[in-house]
């Protein structure tokens, strides 16, 4: 803020109090306006945020007896025509540049101008108000059933995070008091530190990155302006989520400070295994037992699906153990709403014991295929090696 801007601002008008208002009247009016225009009570309202900044700036000056006296004297100096532009010698009016006046160069001095006189006052009020601060990110975990992971689910999540303290409305200051702009970082919350040709930005140590300093802290949050709060949210987990996948839910984390944006919520998803089905990406897997005659002669077999009716697949004659077939569109839901496939692997079942007609039939089959040696090619290959 330039010196000209400073003296031209009517802080009494900003607060709506007369120039002879007492300190008690100023404080009472400020508290009423601060509650009305606080960013937390007017989320997304840029005009209210700007009004709150003006109110805070005015109170910062008028609440301090010394600063108020200096401010009144400075405004009186200019209002009474002590310095007026235009005219010439002998007229009583002098031409000057406001920038020269406050830069201390008026009259060619280079220093020692009125800017030096009021410089301390301007610096104490700060060149900017404390900036909005984004809320912290929150991490949590959830365990879904296999079916919920495939189809998606809305689950309740109970979370504990930091939110504005209800006692002090997030200011960190005791009731009846207000924090002041940190003089070190001038409300930015960060300071720059030179490193050769570079400047590194780091959190301000004096205000711990808040941009504000609390002289009389709130008894509940001890000046931090934050308090732990528990809340339950209904969170939609998208269909097709993978086990141990980390999902980001924008704006569902801790609330921000001074109108800052909320943080994000990160949910790590765990998935319980299924007794029948497995998963490979967007595809589901299942192993289906078949008999020796079905694998040898071919057959139409029924295959279960996840949460739906069974499907029929045609098993070709001479199917080997471990053959995988595909049931289109019976897998997990993809991001675009389509579904993957169900991969069906057959497993030829060998009976533990065979008796009666089945035993006789197998004996006949063995005699009929005695000349067919399935290991002949193996030995030929071994000899050739």
Image: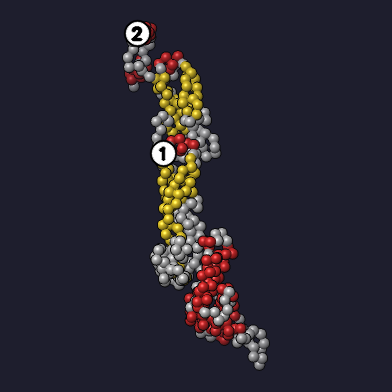
Image quarter in which the N terminus is found: bottom right
Q: Nearer the viewer, residue 124 or 64?
A: 64
Residue 53 can be seen, yes or no: no
Q: Are marks 1 and 2 in contact (CB under 8 Å)?
A: no
Q: Quick one: SS at disc 2?
A: helix
Residue 172 picture location, percent across and down: 44, 66
Within 10 angstroms of label 2, few (less than 14), some, or many (20 or more) residues? Answer: few
Vertical placement of 333 versus 196: above or below?
A: above
Image quarter in which the C terminus is found: top left
Residue 113 can be seen, yes or no: yes
Within 10 angstroms of label 1, few (less than 14), some, or many (20 or more) residues? Answer: some
Vertical placement of 100 versus 265: above or below?
A: below
Query: In the image, which disc is placed on residue 356?
Result: 2
Q: Nearer the viewer, residue 10 or 167?
A: 167
Residue 225 picture location, percent across and down: 44, 63
Which quadrant would residue 4 be assigned to in this image? bottom right
Residue position marked by numbered label 1 in the rendering: 271
Q: How is the image coloured?
A: secondary structure
Residue at figure coordinates x 43%, y 33% from the top left: 279
Residue 323 picture location, percent across and down: 43, 23
Query: In the image, which disc is placed on residue 22?
Result: none
Circle count = 2
Vertical placement of 22 versus 283: above or below?
A: below
Residue at figure coordinates x 46%, y 53% from the top left: 253
Q: Quick one: SS at disc 1?
A: strand
Q: CA distance from mark 1 to mark 2?
A: 48 Å
Residue at figure coordinates x 49%, y 56% from the top left: 262
Residue at figure coordinates x 42%, y 53% from the top left: 230
Which mark is first along the chain, 2 or 1?
Answer: 1
Residue 32 picture location, percent across and down: 53, 69
222 on left or right of 129: left
């Amino acid at each position: 803020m330039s010196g000209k801007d400073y003296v031209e601002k009517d802080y009494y008008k900003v607060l709506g109090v007369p120039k002879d208002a007492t300190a008690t009247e100023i404080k009472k009016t400020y508290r009423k306006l601060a509650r009305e225009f606080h960013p937390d009570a007017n989320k997304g309202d840029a005009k209210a945020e700007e009004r709150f900044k003006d109110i805070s700036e005015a109170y910062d000056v008028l609440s301090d007896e010394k600063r108020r006296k200096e401010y009144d004297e400075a405004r009186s100096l200019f209002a009474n025509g002590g310095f007026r532009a235009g005219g010439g010698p002998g007229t009583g009016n002098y031409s000057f540049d406001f920038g020269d006046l406050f830069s201390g160069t008026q009259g060619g001095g280079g220093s020692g101008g009125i800017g030096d006189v009021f410089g301390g006052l301007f610096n104490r009020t700060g060149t900017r108000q404390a900036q909005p601060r984004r809320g912290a990110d929150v991490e949590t975990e959830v365990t879904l059933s296999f079916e919920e992971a495939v189809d998606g689910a809305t689950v309740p999540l109970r979370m504990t995070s930091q939110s504005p303290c209800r006692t002090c409305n997030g200011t960190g200051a005791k009731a009846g008091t207000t924090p002041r702009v940190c003089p070190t970082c001038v409300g930015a919350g960060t300071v720059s530190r030179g490193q050769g040709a570079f400047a590194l930005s780091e959190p301000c140590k004096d205000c711990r990155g808040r941009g504000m300093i609390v002289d009389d802290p709130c008894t509940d949050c001890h000046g931090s302006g934050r308090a732990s709060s528990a809340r339950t949210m209904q969170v939609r987990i998208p269909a097709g989520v993978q086990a141990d996948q980390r999902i980001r839910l924008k704006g569902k984390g801790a609330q921000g400070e001074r109108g800052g944006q909320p943080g994000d919520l990160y949910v790590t998803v765990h998935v319980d295994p299924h007794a029948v089905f497995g998963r490979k990406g967007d595809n589901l897997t299942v192993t289906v037992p078949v008999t020796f005659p079905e694998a040898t002669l071919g057959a139409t077999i029924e295959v279960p699906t996840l949460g739906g009716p069974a499907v029929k697949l045609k098993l070709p004659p001479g199917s080997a153990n471990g053959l995988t077939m595909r049931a289109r569109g019976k897998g997990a839901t993809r991001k675009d709403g389509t579904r993957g496939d169900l991969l069906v692997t057959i497993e030829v079942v060998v009976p533990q014991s065979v008796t009666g007609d089945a035993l006789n039939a197998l004996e006949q089959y063995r005699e009929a295929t005695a000349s067919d040696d399935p290991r002949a090619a193996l030995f030929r290959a071994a000899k050739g090696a």
